């Protein structure tokens, strides 16, 4: 068909009218459609979000907008600051352009921003920051892992015994550790110290300083696991100040990431775990302006959980799943119909004089069935026993004390209640007895000399008892495993892949199990002398 000039003019006019309509169309916030054509649906669109002013924020410059210069690449030996009122939380060799990002800055092209641009619009303004948790092909002790934090000396102290809430947006927008596109959850932790001079923490010029809790005066105030799914996710940490807190550090927790196997040298950016933070608010919990969803009391854990929104007079409700409106979900309660995968639920509450969007509520597949806690077991004197590690979405009540893991250090009877995010519970009753394990000690030499003279040529630990299981691993200073054996009679001769390695200090990790079933661990360094 021949297209005339008249047809072209008509097509251009239609295109113009469609774009004019999109430019003036308004987003309808409860129909699951992108009405204004900006690629954002329902609560994803800023036009549908309730906006409010937070007063009394303990954090200055909580959205990182204020800065006296655009981010550059020089490191901490030049300047501790990354933005007004914020500074490096730990000594680090990373330049500030990897920590601080501002979209108004022309040269903000650090590797993080180049490969992992955030979803726009940002939660607040034009700036945000990065925190980082590293891993290696083989594990290294936590105090030596490179982790990055941001810190702020507070204008007013957090007072002992008062409950506070830190609210923030977090995101992870690309995952270098998995090229299939899957984005793993990550943990954000909050640490506190009474002394503002405690930041940056750690040793200068160290390759890694681990987390703040490795250093005197620092305490873990709280932490939470975030599932960003490639988008900004709002999260919060609530805690009670154990003493007056004057400075805070925000970043990864003290856990050790599992080893990965993607780069032979274990030092490239493919190993980095980068997370972004923005729009931080720290207030007494009683003053916090956000509303929270609860699981309705009496929900049957064999059925789907029932979520309950705060009740307001003459209010209208609209529920959202992953920021998209749920059809006909307009009551103050909502029965979840999908507990597989990871999903966040919000409720939008409107009254004659206010608009309220609840904080996101996480619903995910329950991990209660994964918990394995024995009925009875023993613990060595002056030792601790990890009965259940931290599991995403699970909290524990241990004889009335809340924890994210079950770690026991004293004998006695324990009632352990494990709860998931859906409000379901499992209860364990366990008796811990204390045992004298000195009859099964291990001797580890501090040094050895593999020079072929027949004296002290092999690094070989010695047990004064029979071990039902034994595992010894040796690592170099970069965390690379260079020796491994499960044979107590086999030692290390100071070689790797058949070649002699240079003298120096090497890290050993030894685990063994006694005939009573007690698992014991020995960790330290051995010096190879040639």
Image (cartoon, rainbow, N blue to C red):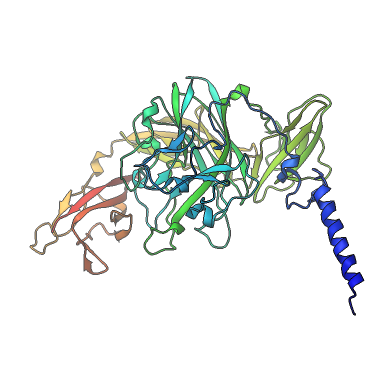
Kindly indicate the quadrant of the structure image that contains residue 5: bottom right
- Front-lying residue, 336 or 424: 336
Residue, x 61% and y 22% (percent of image)?
A: 286
Reply above or below: 530 against 99: below
On the image, the x and y values in percent for residue 268 come to: 41, 59
Which quadrant of the rendered structure holds the C terminus?
bottom left
Q: Seen from this angle, which residue lies furthest front?
A: 5
On the image, the x and y values in percent for residue 264 come to: 38, 64
- Front-lying residue, 268 or 473: 268
On the image, the x and y values in percent for residue 64 come to: 54, 37
Query: Would residue 110 appear left or right of 41 to someone viewing this image?
Result: left
On the image, the x and y values in percent for residue 77 come to: 34, 42
Which quadrant of the rendered structure holds the N terminus?
bottom right
- Front-lying residue, 255 or 26: 26
Q: Seen from this angle, which residue lies furthest bottom?
A: 1
Reply above or below: 435 against 119: above
Query: Would residue 17 appear left or right of 285 to someone viewing this image?
Result: right
Residue, x 47% and y 26% (percent of image)?
A: 154
Q: How many discs mark residues in the rendered view?
A: 0
Q: Can I make out residue 172 in this image?
A: yes
Q: Seen from this angle, which residue lies furthest left?
A: 453
Q: Can I make out residue 460 in this image?
A: no
- Front-lying residue, 271 or 332: 271
Residue, x 82% and y 37% (percent of image)?
A: 330
Query: Would residue 412 appear left or right of 402 to someone viewing this image?
Result: left
Query: Would residue 350 appear left or right of 508 to someone viewing this image?
Result: right
């Amino acid at each position: 068909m021949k297209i005339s000039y008249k047809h072209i003019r008509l097509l251009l006019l239609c295109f113009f009218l469609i774009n004019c309509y999109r430019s003036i169309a308004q987003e309808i916030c409860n129909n699951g459609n992108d009405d204004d054509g900006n690629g954002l649906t329902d609560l994803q669109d800023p036009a549908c979000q309730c906006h409010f002013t937070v007063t009394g924020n303990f954090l200055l410059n909580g959205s990182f907008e204020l800065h006296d210069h655009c981010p550059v690449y020089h490191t901490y030996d030049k300047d501790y600051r990354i933005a007004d009122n914020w500074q490096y939380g730990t000594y680090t060799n990373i330049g500030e352009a990897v920590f601080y990002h501002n979209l108004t800055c022309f040269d903000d092209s650090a590797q993080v921003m180049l490969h992992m641009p955030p979803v726009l619009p940002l939660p607040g303004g034009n700036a945000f920051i990065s925190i980082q948790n590293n891993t290696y092909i083989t594990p290294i002790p936590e105090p030596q892992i490179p982790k990055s934090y941001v810190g702020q000396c507070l204008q007013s102290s957090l007072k002992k015994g008062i409950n506070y809430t830190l609210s923030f947006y977090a995101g992870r927008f690309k995952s270098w550790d998995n090229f299939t596109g899957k984005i793993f959850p990550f943990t954000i932790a909050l640490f506190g110290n009474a002394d503002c001079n405690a930041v940056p923490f750690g040793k200068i010029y160290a390759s890694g300083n681990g987390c703040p809790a490795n250093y005197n005066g620092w305490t873990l105030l709280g932490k939470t696991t975030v599932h960003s799914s490639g988008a900004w996710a709002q999260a919060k940490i609530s805690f009670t100040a154990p003493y007056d807190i004057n400075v805070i550090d925000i970043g990864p927790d003290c856990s050790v990431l599992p080893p990965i196997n993607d780069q032979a040298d274990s030092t490239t950016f493919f190993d980095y775990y980068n997370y972004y933070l923005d729009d931080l608010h720290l207030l007494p919990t009683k003053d916090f302006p956000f509303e929270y969803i609860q699981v309705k009391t009496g929900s049957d854990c064999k059925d789907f959980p029932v979520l309950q929104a705060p009740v307001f007079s003459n209010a209208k409700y609209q529920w959202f799943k992953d920021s998209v409106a749920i059809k006909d979900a307009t009551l103050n309660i909502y029965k979840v119909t999908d507990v597989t995968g990871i999903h966040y639920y919000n409720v939008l509450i409107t009254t004659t004089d206010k608009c309220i969007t609840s904080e996101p509520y996480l619903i995910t597949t329950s991990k209660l069935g994964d918990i394995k806690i024995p009925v009875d077991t023993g613990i060595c004197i002056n030792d601790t026993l990890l009965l259940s590690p931290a599991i995403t979405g699970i909290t524990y009540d241990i004889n009335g004390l809340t924890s994210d893991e079950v770690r026991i250090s004293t004998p006695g009877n324990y009632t352990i209640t494990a709860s998931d995010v859906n409000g379901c519970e499992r209860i364990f009753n366990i008796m811990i007895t204390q045992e004298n394990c000195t009859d099964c000690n291990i001797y580890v030499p501090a040094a050895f000399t593999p020079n072929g003279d027949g004296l002290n040529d092999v690094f070989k630990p010695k047990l004064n008892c029979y071990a039902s299981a034994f595992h010894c691993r040796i690592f170099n200073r970069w965390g690379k495993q260079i020796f491994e054996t499960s044979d107590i009679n086999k030692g290390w001769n100071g070689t790797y892949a058949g070649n002699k390695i240079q003298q120096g200090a090497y890290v050993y990790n030894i685990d063994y199990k006694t005939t009573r079933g007690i698992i014991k661990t020995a960790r330290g360094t051995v010096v190879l002398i040639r």
